[in-house]
Image: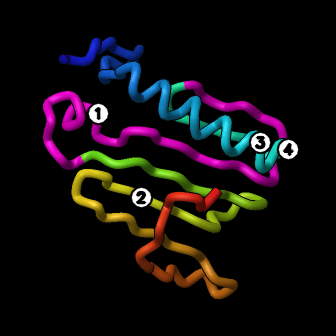
Amino acid sequence: KPLDVESKSDASPVTIADRAAEEAMRSVINKRFPTHSVYGEEFGLDLRDSENVWVLDPIDGTKSFITGKPVFGTLVAFVEEGSPVLGVIDQPITKSPAGGTFQKELWATFLPVGLHGYL
């Protein structure tokens, strides 16, 4: 069944899947970290604590997602005190999760991660 596709103000596509995925991600974060802020592509900024911010793109590559191409993914980042701490991408079709973390020296260390149960 084809997805209903709407256009955002910048003319990029958005689907119910984009919105539902971001709502689910926000729900998990809000339950686990109730004081943290969340900035998502679909619903913008929910500012609670400027020191701890989660950045979400529930379906990066919506055009590919809509057309059935396997080159889309979910992006999650965590910023603490203005500095990126964690970045994760999961490409569910290709089963290619990856993550990066910034150590005190600010060197990125990339490693495969299991995303299920992370939050």
Front: mark 1 or 3: 3
- 33 lies left or right of 21: right
Under mark 3, the amino acid is Lys
Label 3, residues with CA under 10 Å away: few <14, some 14-19, many ≥20: few
Q: Residue at x 49, y 26 (%)?
A: 20
Q: Tag 1, which secondary structure?
A: helix
Label 4, residues with CA under 10 Å away: few <14, some 14-19, many ≥20: some
N-term-proximal mark, 4 vs 2: 4
- The residue where tag 2 is placed is 89
Q: Which mark is residue 62?
A: 1
Q: How is the image coloured?
A: rainbow
Q: Tag 2, which secondary structure?
A: strand
Under mark 4, the amino acid is Thr
Q: Which mark is residue 35?
A: 4
Under mark 1, the amino acid is Thr
Per the rendered image, the range of residues in magenta is 43-71
Percent coordinates x, y for residue 54 in the rendering: 65, 48
